[in-house]
Image (cartoon, coloured by chain):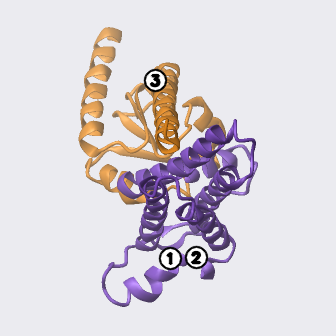
């Protein structure tokens, strides 16, 4: 598949959005002594990421970059010859994990196991944020590596 | 215990386990690869495994390789040339393999390798090649 131009600033804004949203949900709910209202940000983020994967026009953070941050000159564009597919795959994977996290956080469960499922759900959301940070800071994209491995094994057309 | 503290502990444990697994995986792959062979050359050279979907290859690795000066760099598409990629245990991109002139793998770098590191490894490969030639002569 041919290379195209990918604006890496849009990807960075997307990663920053993921990290900020998860941190607000996590520490906000902690500060509010277990109030679950802010935790609703996790399923919302899952929806945003999954929608953005299949319909890039609906990718909230990327649209924020293209419609606001870039025109206002707040974030400068950084076009790179690249393929968008691995990045989309990584975003979709993040969305899937956040969806699993949301189920664990909001699924009504036995009060005896609630502590475990809720903690596990939050831990998954935190891991998504950690991976977004690693990508943002060091350029290492785990989702892209998984995409490469699946392509190498012929499981997807990479 | 607070739910958030427990979540932090779980996430931290997963990160540590992943880091440990990655360190083990790369050291095991290095052990398997060092000594693997490819074609001989007049000078030490670099096998550079890349792929179309590898962003770090274009943004970091290729500029680093360009800084090395007149060194032979064989660019290999890890997906198209799967057999060669498997021989060098390529599990991540970019991967760079510093080969001696005799075609023996001396150093393997999984992930981005800066120019300074590659320069040092190439210097070792040159010394190694000279020693091997002297021993054969």
Query: How much space separates mark 1 and mark 3, taking CA atoms?
Result: 38 Å
Instruction: Describe residue B15's horizontal placement relative to residue B62 as left or right.
Output: right
Label 3 to label 2: alpha-carbon separation: 39 Å
Which chain is tinted orange?
Answer: B
The chain letter under disc 1 is: A
A43 with respect to B55 (left or right): right
Disc 3 + disc 2, Cβ < 8 Å: no
User: Residue B84 appears at what percent x and percent y?
Assistant: 60, 36
What residue does disc 3 label?
B27
The secondary element bearing badge 1 is classed as helix
Q: Which chain carries label 2?
A: A
Q: Which mark is residue A38?
A: none
The lab-note entry on whether marks 3 and 2 share a chain reads no
- Callout 3: 10 Å neighbours few (<14), some, many (20+)? some
Can residue B76 be seen here? The reply is no
Mark 1 lies on residue: A62
Picture residue at 68% right of the left edge, 49% below the top: A104
The residue located at (30%, 38%) in the rendering is B118
Residue under the point 51% across and 82% down:
A63
Residue A94 horizontal side relative to residue B41, left or right: right
Chain A color in figure:
purple
The tag on residue A59 is 2
**Mark 3 against mark 2, which lies toward the viewer?**
2
Query: Label 2: how many residues lie within 10 Å, few (<14), some (14-19) or many (20+)?
Result: some
């Amino acid at each position: 598949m041919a290379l195209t131009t990918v604006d890496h600033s849009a990807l960075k804004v997307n990663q920053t959005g993921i990290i900020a949203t998860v941190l607000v949900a996590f520490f906000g709910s902690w500060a509010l002594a277990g109030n679950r209202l802010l935790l609703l940000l996790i399923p919302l983020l899952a929806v945003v990421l999954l929608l953005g994967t299949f319909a890039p026009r609906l990718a909230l953070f990327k649209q924020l970059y293209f419609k606001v941050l870039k025109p206002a000159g707040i974030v400068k564009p950084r076009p790179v010859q690249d393929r968008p597919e691995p990045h989309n795959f990584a975003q979709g994977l993040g969305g899937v994990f956040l969806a699993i996290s949301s189920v664990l956080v909001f699924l009504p469960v036995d009060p005896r196991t609630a502590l475990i499922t809720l903690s596990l759900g939050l831990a998954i959301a935190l891991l998504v944020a950690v991976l977004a940070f690693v990508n943002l800071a060091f350029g290492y994209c785990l989702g892209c590596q998984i995409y490469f491995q699946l392509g190498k094994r012929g499981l997807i057309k990479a | 215990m607070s739910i958030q503290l427990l979540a932090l502990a779980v996430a931290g444990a997963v990160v540590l386990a992943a880091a440990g697994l990655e360190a083990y995986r790369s050291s095991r792959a290095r052990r398997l690869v060092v000594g693997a062979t490819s074609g001989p050359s007049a000078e030490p050279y670099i096998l550079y495994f890349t792929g179309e979907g590898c962003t770090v290859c274009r943004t970091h690795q290729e500029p680093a390789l360009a800084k090395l000066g007149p060194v032979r760099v064989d660019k290999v598409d890890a997906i198209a040339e799967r057999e060669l990629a498997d021989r060098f245990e390529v599990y991540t991109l970019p991967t760079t393999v510093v080969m001696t002139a005799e075609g023996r793998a001396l150093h393997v770098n999984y992930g981005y390798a800066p120019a300074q590191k590659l320069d040092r490894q190439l210097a070792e490969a040159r010394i190694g090649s000279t020693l091997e030639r002297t021993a054969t002569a």
